[in-house]
Amino acid sequence: MKVTGQFAGNLHENLSVAQLTKIALEREEGVLTSTGALRVLTGSYTGRSPKDKYVVNEPSIEKNIDWGPVNQTISPKQFERLYNKAMDYMARRELFVFVGYAGADQDYRLPIRVITEKAWHNLFVQQLFIRPSKDELFTHKADFTVISLPGLKGDPAVDGTRSETFICPLKRRLFLSEGPNMPGK
């Protein structure tokens, strides 16, 4: 997934902690505490929304997924509709991109890209994953992309979701996470 050309002008890639904190404060996503830490409110949802997780049922993974109330099936057509909805939404938003690695062991680490709608989400991601060196940035090629768009809401009647929240991992090595159950909403 190439992000830069599609969203040129709305994209901030691998900003520093100071830059992300400044933007989060300017956008009123949080406030500074007396110790200088950024404090944010996650809203009424403080954790996962397991009943809103959908997986595209494909032959390559069908037998490896524990299907049920936590891993619900979604058709490729439904996923494409949600994906296109997310792409349209992203085209009209300021976005923050982190490229880095999941896992510290060089032999097993996974190159990832995380695209967020909120500056503080990107700041959180920078603390969670490994930041690449300047040299690694030149050769980094993400094997997995996470897209977090808490302002985008699903429509159960149109999108086939249970609620306005939907989390769709695994299709195209893409993890689509949207709706009010994400931090910051």
Image: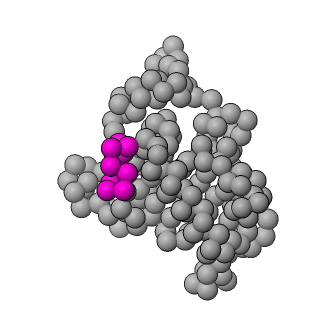
For residue 166, side relative to residue 26 (left or right)? right
| Image position of 76 with respect to 27: above or below | below
Residue lying at 53% horizontally and 28% vertically, measured from the top left: 29
- Taking the view exactly as shown, the residue that stands out farthest to the top is 34
| Image position of 37 with respect to 133: above or below | above
Of residues 91 and 130, the one nearer the viewer is 91
Q: Position of residue 45 (x, y in %)?
A: 71, 40
Q: Position of residue 12 (x, y in %)?
A: 35, 42
- Magenta range: 4-12
Residue lying at 71% horizontally and 72% vertically, measured from the top left: 73
Residue lying at 47% horizontally and 24% vertically, measured from the top left: 25
For residue 182, side relative to residue 164 (left or right)? left
The answer to whether residue 63 shows anywhere in this view is yes
For residue 135, side relative to residue 164 (left or right)? left
Q: Position of residue 112 (x, y in %)?
A: 41, 59
Of residues 126 and 97, the one nearer the viewer is 97
Label count reads 0
- Taking the view exactly as shown, the residue that stands out farthest to the bottom is 59
Q: Position of residue 47 (x, y in %)?
A: 68, 44
Q: Point out the image quarter for the C terminus.
A: top right
Of residues 7 and 128, the one nearer the viewer is 7
Q: Is residue 129 magenta?
A: no
Q: Is residue 11 magenta?
A: yes
The answer to whether residue 127 shows anywhere in this view is no
| Image position of 67 with respect to 118: above or below | below
For residue 9, side relative to residue 139 (left or right)? right
Residue lying at 33% horizontally and 49% vertically, measured from the top left: 8
Q: Point out the image quarter for the N terminus.
A: bottom left
What colour scheme has been applied to the protein in the rendered image?
one colour
Main SS of the magenta part reads: loop
